[in-house]
Amino acid sequence: MSPQPAMAFSVFGMDGILMVEDAGALSRGLQQVLSICADVDASCSRFRADTDLSRVNAAHGAPIRVSATFGAVLELSIQAARLTDGAVDPTVGAALESVGYDCDFEELGRSVHPLDQLPVRIPGWRVVEWDPAQLTVRIPDGVKLDFGSIAKAYAVDLGAAAVAGRLGAPACVAIGGDVAAAGEPQEPWHVGVAEDHRTAFIDADDFIGITSGGVATSSTTVRAWMQDGVRRHHIIDPGTGAPVAEAYRTATVVAGSCVEANTASTAAIVWGARARASLEGWGVHARLVTVEGEVEFAGNWPRGEAA
């Protein structure tokens, strides 16, 4: 990111940064962002036994009352499934566990991942029974939800909007490759694009500028591990129940929100060869990297300019 007034932080096991035009709003703005992230983590983490997500997954088919935050992320996940015709689906939790992603990613390299029975059938988002009036959710016994990075994207969108709305300071929030901007900044926020979200800004593969909306990158190159000698990654193809067979290894999308960008970038990896046409039909802008390292574009990719 660019050298505008900024504060770095760590959340979700990742590095984050908050930028604002008014340096005086940094401290209070960061408190708001961290509070939102803590609420999302307490509701939606798959790696904590006390979260709404863990309780729903362990309910053996019983209805569970959940928080409004969980409900908001669930609705966004169901919407993502509808928009992508099931390419991004929240019922992939059991499949992720079967390929070894059953603990926090930082622990994966230190764990042994025996080859489980594959593939795992993905039941699909329509099996989720969600009552927004009562804040209850029920899934069939054996089904497990996972929101992927939609929960993180939601936190990024909400964080930027909270800082801009409550403090009146145009803001940009970035966490682990997900970026959201809110308010009306005098100059674009500069975003570095790379396959690994830990890449330093100066070493990024591309640079763009945004004044609003969101940016998200989905990649199979970073969150990958070995399972009985077989390389696995975290993006599940709901059609097969196994990790996607990549045509593109990385997709970065600019859209109206970080949640929309995140949905589109994940779908692009799943769609493979038809990703460019599908993204252009959607109306979002994308930078795609093939498994061979070739770069392709969809839509009007904002090269160094405001999007």
Image (spheres, rainbow, N blue to C red):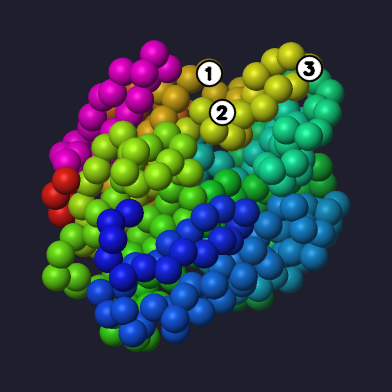
Q: Amino acid at mark 2?
A: Asp
Specify which label sits upstream in the sequence, 2 or 3: 3
**Residue 282 among those drawn in magenta:** yes
Q: Is residue 205 left or right of residue 79?
A: left
Q: Quadrant of residue 214?
A: bottom left
Q: Quadrant of the N terminus?
A: bottom left
For the residues labelled 1 and 2, the Cα–Cα distance comes to: 8 Å
The residue carrying pointer 2 sits among few (fewer than 14), some (14 to 19) or many (20 or more) residues within 10 Å by Cα, namely many
Specify which label sits upstream in the sequence, 3 or 1: 3
Q: Is residue 153 visible?
A: no
**Residue 218 among those drawn in magenta:** no
- Is label 3 in a helix, a strand or a loop? loop
The residue carrying pointer 1 sits among few (fewer than 14), some (14 to 19) or many (20 or more) residues within 10 Å by Cα, namely some
Identify the residue position indicated by label 3 in the image: 228
Q: Do callouts 1 and 2 mark residues in contact (Cβ within 8 Å)?
A: yes
Q: Residue at x 44, y 25 (%)?
A: 249
Point out residue 86 in the picture as x, y percentages from the top left corner.
50, 37
Point out residue 148 in the picture as x, y percentages from the top left corner.
57, 46
Q: Residue at x 56, y 42 (%)?
A: 89
Residue placed most toward the observer, 230 or 135: 230
Point out residue 175 in the picture as x, y percentages from the top left corner.
47, 56
Q: Quadrant of residue 102?
A: top right
Which numbered marker is on residue 237?
2
Q: Which residues are magenta?
A: 279-303
Identify the residue position indicated by label 1 in the image: 245
Residue placed most toward the observer, 306 or 128: 306
